[in-house]
Amino acid sequence: MRMKKKYHLSKCSKYDRSLILRYLKHHAYKIELWQKGFTEKEIEQYEVDKVTETEGIFVIQKVGTFLKRTIPSKLKNGLSYFKVTIGRRSYCGKVNFTHQENSKYILEISGQIYAFDQRENFRLASNDFISVRVKFEEKKFDAIDVSGKSICIIVDSKDVPLFPAGRTLSTMRFVINDDLFIVPHFRVISLREILSPEGKTTQKFKVVCLFTRLPKSQQQEIVKVVESYARKLTLES
């Protein structure tokens, strides 16, 4: 995955850490929790129910109605990962999660907390864990990577005419694992042949498609999913 971890996730100072823990104590911030192997749809949402005398340890419960809160968590006791958004910044890190009685849980934030900056142009690469696939003109293509603004796909030489450079085209569908997005308009901004390590032709091309006239809400949703998978891969590596 193409990722500069030091740039994408920055360590919080002791002072910032104390502020984050204080905010969690006194404000109803939503805390997202997951464990290794969880999909985007399996992420669980919690809120602080009670504070304890020990810094970084909270009694938490699920967000939602009474019935929703009583549904047992799919998280197992032990190592988990959290994310919380405070103002314009997001924070994440590793935590210890423990089941308690009466639909309550213990969250212990003892490790490093990272500031997580959302960027529209961060590129998430397709790999063994992240499958990015495209459908256009009833044909399916594999993608190399995707961001909130564009997607890079692999095209056989016979399909190159479908992607004229500089033209605005419609409509493209793509998925990031199980998350589906429909892009109404895009423009081909780059078309390059993929060569083998020996410099020989492969009859395949890299096509970079820029999303155009994309509604802001849709772009934000793409960024949210891209960033979520990027965060998981970074923390779980």
Image: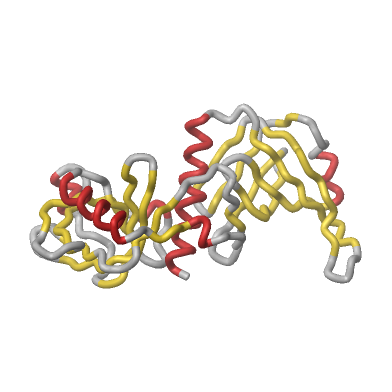
Quadrant housing the N terminus? bottom right
Q: In the depicted view, which residue is nearer to us: 19 or 24?
A: 19
What's the coloring here? Answer: secondary structure
Give coordinates of residue 212: x percent, y percent: 65, 31
Locate residue 236: give its quadrant. Answer: bottom left
Give coordinates of residue 16: x percent, y percent: 31, 54
Left or right relative to 83: residue 54: left
Locate residue 213: give its quadrant. Answer: top right
Give the residue drawn at x 60%, y 51%: 123
Q: In the depicted view, which residue is nearer to us: 197 or 139?
A: 197
Give the residue drawn at x 38%, y 45%: 89
Image mark count? 0
Q: From what the image shows, is residue 4 above or below residue 166?
A: below
Q: From what the image shows, is residue 198 above or below residue 38?
A: below
Locate residue 186: give its quadrant. Answer: top right
Give the residue drawn at x 28%, y 62%: 74
Q: In the depicted view, which residue is nearer to us: 219 or 55?
A: 55
Q: In the depicted view, which residue is nearer to us: 62 or 85?
A: 85
Give the residue drawn at x 22%, y 65%: 108
Q: From what the image shows, is residue 188 above or below residue 116?
A: above
Left or right relative to 19: residue 219: right
Give coordinates of residue 93: x percent, y percent: 35, 62
